[in-house]
Amino acid sequence: MSGPRILAIDVGTGTQDVLVFEAGTLVENAAQLIMPSPTALVAQRVKEATADRVDLVLTGVTMGGGPNHWAVEAHLKAGLRVYATEDAARTFDDDLERVTAMGIRIVDGPNGAGDARRLELRDVYTAELMTALGAFGVSTAFDAVAVAVFDHGAAPPGVSDRRFRFDYLREQVERGVGLPGFGFLADEIPRRMTRMRAVAGSWTGSEPLFVMDTAPAAVLGALEDERVQSVDRVMIANLGNFHTIAVSLEGQKIRGLLEHHTGELTKAKLEDYLDAMAAGTLSDQAVFDDMGHGALQAGTRSAPPELLTVIGPRRGLLDGSRLHPYLAVPHGDMMLAGCFGLLRALASRVPGFAPAIEDQLGAQKPN
């Protein structure tokens, strides 16, 4: 059977997870890679520059933060200089005045930074990935590429990026777009989603590009698990390295949503949040005041969730939990949940890919 080949890349804070989908094969046999995330790679190179006692100039595009942000702060505290172009600087904050307050010097290009070591910021390592696949005889010809990144959006000055992002999530839920609606073809990405647009702007391939938020992609991928598919009302918690998202679903209708920073959570605190979400009593303001993003409830649920499902690299946070969570393993590989979600969302947006994707992954869970 011939059909589309799709490259799915889920870019997280700890890892970037890659799946090569090929129609007519078994998804269990698909080429896949679990590699360090772009932000972790940049952080390591910043640390090397710090050890070498050299200044840095950051070029490229807006990318994900976390480890690279902390490494740059440490570089500055070591008495070394950091220069950045405007696009690269927005990796650290949408407000460039706050970036300069960190100590980063904004320049038009690398020529404005003397002999500083150049470091390019980007979320997709296209050339490196193609080299790795080619080294093992895997074709690098694709009919589409799907990428997931976590995007706070470009918050206006004085507006919390946590609040700005969660307001966007709330708007999408209220619009009723469902989990696949958090993904966009390259020319459809909202202007506020600067990280997604940076991915699209830096993509040099000729293939159609689909970009999605990592959080709903992971939740959508968790629905691939057979036990999760067997119930109508499910709560899915994706415990990522940096962010935790929990979604309460009836079919694929979103009835509740919680987003927080994993590092701020303890087992007891997360259990309490999930209990309140199941009961419909979780406070958005309480989550925000706890340094999380927020919480929402949509519509009226018919009954509490039948199953709590947990995925993500930090799922061990709920080991031994009184909530007795089920550890989902979609298609035998929890780390590829985001890639499976990307494929499902792409099939929803580009129906021409749906038959091949459903042939491998099975029929979509009904709404």
Image (cartoon, rainbow, N blue to C red):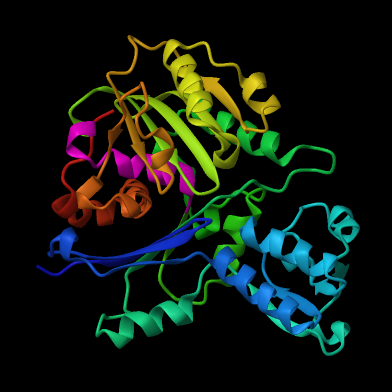
Answer whether residue 256 is magenta in the image: no
Identity of the residue furthest to the bottom in this view:
115
Tell me where residue 336 appears, x and y as whole percent.
32, 54
Q: Which residues are magenta?
A: 212-228
Residue 194, percent from left and from top: 65, 55
> Quadrant of the rendered structure where residue 67 is?
bottom right
Above or below residue 240? Residue 298 is above
Tell me where residue 360 sits by quadrant. bottom left
Q: Residue at x 67, y 20 (%)?
A: 285
Position of 275 with respect to 99 (left or right) is left
Q: Is residue 220 magenta?
A: yes
Residue 44 percent coordinates (x, y): 61, 72
Quarter of the figure with residue 199: bottom right
Q: Is residue 292 left or right of residue 315?
A: right
Residue 294, visible in the rendered structure: yes
Front residue of 295/52: it is: 52
- The chief SS type of the magenta part is helix
Q: Is residue 251 above or below residue 264?
A: above
The quadrant in which the C terminus is found is top left
- Taking depth in this image into account, of 337 and 185 the one nearest to the observer is 337
User: Quick check: can you spot residue 180?
Assistant: no
Q: Residue at x 19, y 67 (%)?
A: 3
Of residue 289 and residue 130, the one placed in the foreground of this image is: 289
Residue 111 in picture, x, y percent from top left: 84, 87
Furthest-left residue in view? 1
Image quarter of the N terminus? bottom left
Residue drawn where x is 41% and y is 46% of the image: 217
Residue placed most toward the observer, 227 or 53: 53
